Amino acid sequence: MCFVVTDLINSSCAVKNAAYLSDKQIRSAHMSIGKHMSSMKVVLGFLEEAEPWRLRSPQFPSKVGGKPAWLSQRGLPSLPGLECEKCRLPMAFLLQVYAPISTQDTCFHRTLFLFCCKTPECYTCNDSRCMKVFRSQLPRRNDFYLYDPPSDELPTIPEQDSSVLPVSKVKLCWVCGCPGNKTCSRCHTVTYCGKHHQTLHWKYTHKKECCSQEASIVTSPFLFPEFELVTEPEEEEENREDKREADKREGDSTQKGVDYPSLTDTLAETDLEEMALHETEDNKLFQWFKKKIAPEPHQVVRYSRGGSPLWVSSQHIPSDKGIPPCNCGAKRTFEFQVMPQLLNSLCVDSTGASIDWGTLAVYTCAASCNYDDHYSPEFIWKQDFSSDKQTH
């Protein structure tokens, strides 16, 4: 969820919790965390089941799937901005990462949102047009959340209507959770982002429940499965070597192999290697990719603001000029990447065309500018495993 080393503050929500110290302590704590994060190389993200209330906006979650837990309730991405640039259909929420910047007051709360198309045919090789990423940030004192930290206990008040944002009153689509001002012409109570999702809901449940007092609360079939995204720092190579030596001395290395499945268990390694072995350079890079993720094969996100991505191929790596600057004019720098292991949890397997990627690298404004209080579009680079396909 929040990116800070556990020996600084022993919690997966360390930045969030540390941020809410007394006013006297807040600045020094933020500075301490900021320095520690700047020296940190990589933080890994893993999927965990979580109670639904923990994944809602007031808890400032990092999560995968479900509906977006919007941070700012104003200036949400426009509907055209949330369409796939290839098929022009609405994109689905893939994940969000809560990543405040401790040294900037305007980034006390800061979340990155990633959306992707659900049309398999849009996933042509090394083509990022089927994905988009947005950044939202707020100061500690804002119109939407309490100044003090959220409770870590189950809320005693009933959960609010998820079809409308409580402060701004922005209406949300029942299917995808994105802004939606179109309503069902019969019941005038259910809202949608457009005709496509209205038709989908009608066929799924609304045809039977329209104007009914007892409409069922079910998860939209359009959404990806929902998980919490929890994090821990990547262990340094020398520490892993020391641990391996200790395991060897204790004779328990075999048991560790049971506890931590190999990459073969989480990826179709044979298929990946067939694609990656076309060139020696690709082979070397792919072997390095496998070596880096092998100690933690279930990682789905690698976070390292200002660091470098872990590429799966020597082909289609962006140059500095290939990363466009922010709308404010500032340079964009790497912030995090989405790993192919995530695909195993999204239930997207299909024969023929399929939702797929080698890795997704997200680049954000180095200044983390305020974009007129709107969600700021950022840049995503999709790299696929090497193959005979050409970039379209």
Image (cartoon, rainbow, N blue to C red):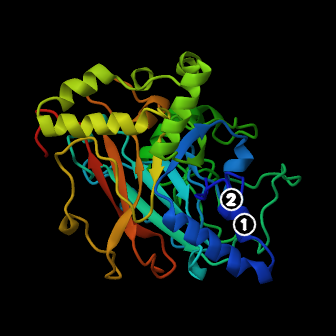
Q: Which residue shows up at 57% across the image and 71% down it? A: 34
Q: Is residue 116 or residue 54 the one in the foreground?
A: 54
Q: Which amino acid does label 2 sit on?
A: Ala
Residue 23 location, x and y as percent?
78, 82
The reply, left or right, for residue 195 in relation to residue 74 is: left
Residue plotted at (81% across, 54% down): 152
Where is residue 128? Give x, y as percent.
27, 51
Task: Tell me, for residue 18, which label it has, or none.
Answer: 1
Q: In this view, does 353 lie above or below 320?
A: above
Along the line of sight, the residue nearer the viewer: 170 or 116: 116
Disc 1 to disc 2: CB gap under 8 Å: yes
Q: Nearer the viewer, residue 146 or 319?
A: 319
Up-down relation of residue 192 to residue 370 (above or below): above
Residue topped by disc 2: 14
Horizontal and vertical percent position of residue 209: 65, 35
Q: Disc 1 residue type?
A: Ala
Residue 39 shows up from this direction? yes
Q: Quadrant of residue 343?
A: top left
Q: Identify the image quadrant of residue 24.
A: bottom right
